[in-house]
Amino acid sequence: MLMGKRDEVNGRPWVTWLLLALLIFLLLCLPLFIRGTYYRHIVIFTLMYVVLAQAWNLIGGYAGQIALGNMVFFAIGAYTSTILTIQFDLSPWLGMWVGGGLAVLVSLGLGLAVLKLEGHYFAMSTIAFGEILRTVFSNWRFVGGAQGISLPLHSPSLYYMQWANKVPYYYIILTMAVLVTVLVFLLDRSRFGFYTKAIKLDDVAARNRGINAFKLKLLAFALNAFITAMVGSFYAQYILYISPSSVLLLVTSILLAVIPIVGGVGTVLGPILGAVFIFPLTEFLRAMFGGLAMGVNYIMFGAAAIFVIMVEPLGFVAMLSCIKRWFRRLMEEKGGVEVEGAEG
Amino acid sequence: MRQKKTFMKRGQKIGTVLVICGAVFGLTLGGPAMLSAKEVKIGVIWPLTGPNAYLGGTCKSMTDVVLDLINNSHDIDSPGDMFRSKGLPNLGGATVKFIYGDDEAKPDVGRSAAERLVTVDKVDAMQGTVMSGVSTVISQVTEKYQVPIVNSNSTSPKLTQRGFKWFFRTTPHAKTFIGTILAFLKDLRDKKNLKIETIAIVCEDTQWGQDAADVIRKNCPKYGLKVVVDIPYAQESTSVEAEVLNLKKTNPDVIFMSSYDNDAILFQKTYKKYNLNIPIVANNTGHTNQLFGDTFGKDTHFVMTRDMWSASMLETIPLAKRLDEMLKKIGFKAGMNETTGRVFIGTLTLMDAINRAGSTDKKAIQKALQETNIPGSYLALPWEGVKFDSNGQNMYGGAIMTQWHDRQLKAIWPWQISETDVVWKLPSW
Amino acid sequence: MLLQSIASGLLVGSVYAIIAVGLTLIWGIMEVVNFAHGSYLMLSMYICYVLHMLMGFDPLLSMPIAVVILFFIGIGTYKTIIFRIMNAPMLFQIFTTFALQFIINYTVFLIAKPTFRTVKITFLDGVVKVKGLFLDNAMIVSALVCVLAFLFLHIFLQFTKIGKGIRATTDNPRAALALGIDIEKMYAYTWGVSLALVAVAGAILSRIIYTHPTVGDKFGLFAFVAVALGGFGSIYGALLGGLMIGVVTTVTGVYAIPWFKLPSIFAIFILTLIVRPRGLLGWK
């Protein structure tokens, strides 16, 4: 579980760095390979989910509190930057940060109240909070009520963060995804990661050593809120329409938790794998089956999800380490090569 | 931790998952199958799953019927005589193919579906959808890619106020509909000397209901009506005791409702329970469905609704009767109603435009749509016709008021077309 | 009017309570979170609908049948899926039962189509007026059934062999195992009983509300709030929670801003948890 992307491969660290550089390079060139708008849309949304999943990972994976109301922060980000743009002509580039800040405040308020609660109760409170906000937003004319807000078109424009082409959006969300992953990686390796893992292993002992679990959880929650809100602002600029039924749904909040779970919670790679697997899968199922026989895509999605979790409850990340071990054993047997560093 | 029960060996498990992943990605990137040439491809988006799945299914039944009418030979009159030939006559008998997308009543999903239909399936034109919020987003996509789209069921006035050039709406919007209702109430008050001064607004809280609530609230003063209570309620509510008790407490002269099927049923049951005897004027949908009539029988209790359809039209409009039969034949038992009527008009308009354009060139179709002028005799509802103004809004299409008498909806207004007298003073349940 | 609101609220709440009790049973005894609870409610409603269509049965008559069917479905669900996630973290339980909800809902969707179906009944329909209060007959029945169900449950858990076995397993699984109690069987029975309770609620609801593939979801959500409000694992807590939801939503809807009806219960929920972090009657 202490595995990260930059594990040592065969005792030669630079191989890992090389692979990473290659990956980054490929990602940067991706728009050249994928030219279809629909497919670019899938890639952008997948990256969005990567960021959201990483954010959730902080509170749900590391801090171990299952939050099922994250769309609240997403909505705060989306609505704040949008309203600021419409009312004050403020660029979303700045509005994003205001939204993020607001989300942090809300998360601190909520967190102080409910983070002390035990797992199930905490989860239920986040659901409750999400539902409250959804109903409030649906009936609050200032934010457009149930009809939502259509963003005024300015494209193409850097100031208003709108383009006709999808490519700039791709790079923005790619940057976010990379930054967030680096952040999670650093946190994982830092005291934050160390302490949260300690708490997970033995709550009481950790506390006896002076680790303030509550403060850590609050921090995780606030970070989660901030990142999620930023993505919300991005979403608003990309889709150009926000409404309670698109940004405050309970189902989506739960999906945000499902993705890191399938990928592997509490790891750096997990949310990425989860998002890359789940989102294209849902789109594919919808495309193939959605119009054909009503709802079949949902059945398949549910079945696929259960299958994955039955096979490997620790998610894709654990599966990967299995593959690595199996591969290594294969190498050992085949060439009698001495292999070091096979982690348990 | 207890011993995990494994049901597959590790290796097998991993192998299976990898294969599935590979399949998923391969197929996703593979794209859809190639379609034959000489075909007109239309993307159609309806809420096939999700909270409005019933409406979506209804709409799809109708578009399926129209597909049959176009592609096969039927002895029915139509603009350009499309139904008697196989395929579209002006395109050399080219078959029409509908590629369906599901928006799940969510704007995101609708957008995905629209993008897929436009950029991957490369449809020539589109129709859809029902929820105004989703239609907003879908039409943003079609406007960007310059694909003509016909909307037959969304009623938010904002849709045709955006200056879009590729969006055409055949259905009248909320302002027209609410206008009908308010005019009716005023007429009742003046001509029949009834006390109609206070009104309660009870609408479901998603876009459709809220739109209706906003429009009527704004216009009530003009008609001399005072809004005494505004009760938005959650769609798919589990109980409406509170809302109904609130109405009992406030006791308005008339109640205005905008409900979907499930809510309409729930409210009616609750009204009966609490012996609420206030006249109800509804904004269609849930209250015009035959399901409502069948469920309640006598207990429909003279609910009035803005409507575009009444059962008498099966007699007065032969086309409607044919469509009703065709719907029932493909398994849609409810048959013709206002939703299917409007869908029919939308699809017909689109087919007519493509036929007149004589090609699948999108600009040609757009121009043909702008020049649309379909006389009312070809329509399944009693409208004067289909003709678009510069905003893409159909200038014709009015509503009437109908009232439930037992299981039947009878037209009550305008007076010229009324089949029966308005029952305003309600008997006891 | 206030009295009426409270009375109506209590009656509505009794239905939520029955559903909630089943949920808290599973949580209290097995520590499993069941997100698919609402879907089973929906199944029960469809069973009653089908029996009504085919044989003309009033759902009250179909209730025992639905109860038996769902009892076995409960056992079946446990043996095929739930036992695998028994000791998994809450994450996986939520996840699996959530996916289960999807599967059940949409399979029914596929088979039954999303048409709204209603059961038309005349027996025991209507209202009874007591001291100027309108009391829905169907709901009085539900309240009575609720009381009876609680009584049965109490008797079952206290006096029957299986019931005692379940209680022993809850208190101390290892000791129970040592005593020769087949805890797997106990868990399966618990699921069965829980779903049987849901079946009762479903039979009642099918007379009151429309039947539809996703009708159970909102009830499931309320059941969760009721359970958490009352305290996970406490049966009386679930009862209390359910009734509270009924009363609070009704009274708020009548006297406060109408749309605040639902947020009010969620707000009270959060506030209650702040003050009593284990729910009103929670003991874990």
Image: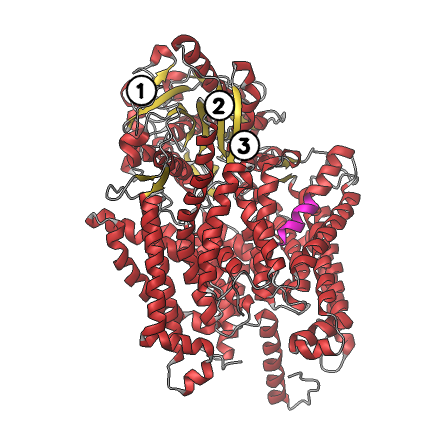
Check if mark 3's residue and mark 2's residue have beta carbons within 8 Å.
no
Residue C112 visible at all: no
Q: Are marks 3 and 2 on the same chain?
A: yes
Location of residue B272 by image quarter? top left
Q: Choose between B264 and A153: the one closer to the eye.
A: B264
Q: Is residue A151 above or below residue A118?
A: above
Q: What secondary structure is marked by label 3?
A: helix
Neighbor class of circle 1 (other Cα within 10 Å; few <14, some 14-19, many 20+) is some
Disc 1 target residue? B317
Residue type, mark 1 in image:
Ile
* 2 or 1: tag closer to the N-terminus: 2
Task: Verify whether residue B385 appears in magenta.
Answer: no
Location of residue B429 by image quarter? top left
Disc 2 target residue? B199
Disc 3 target residue? B210
Q: Choose between A203 and A26: the one closer to the eye.
A: A203
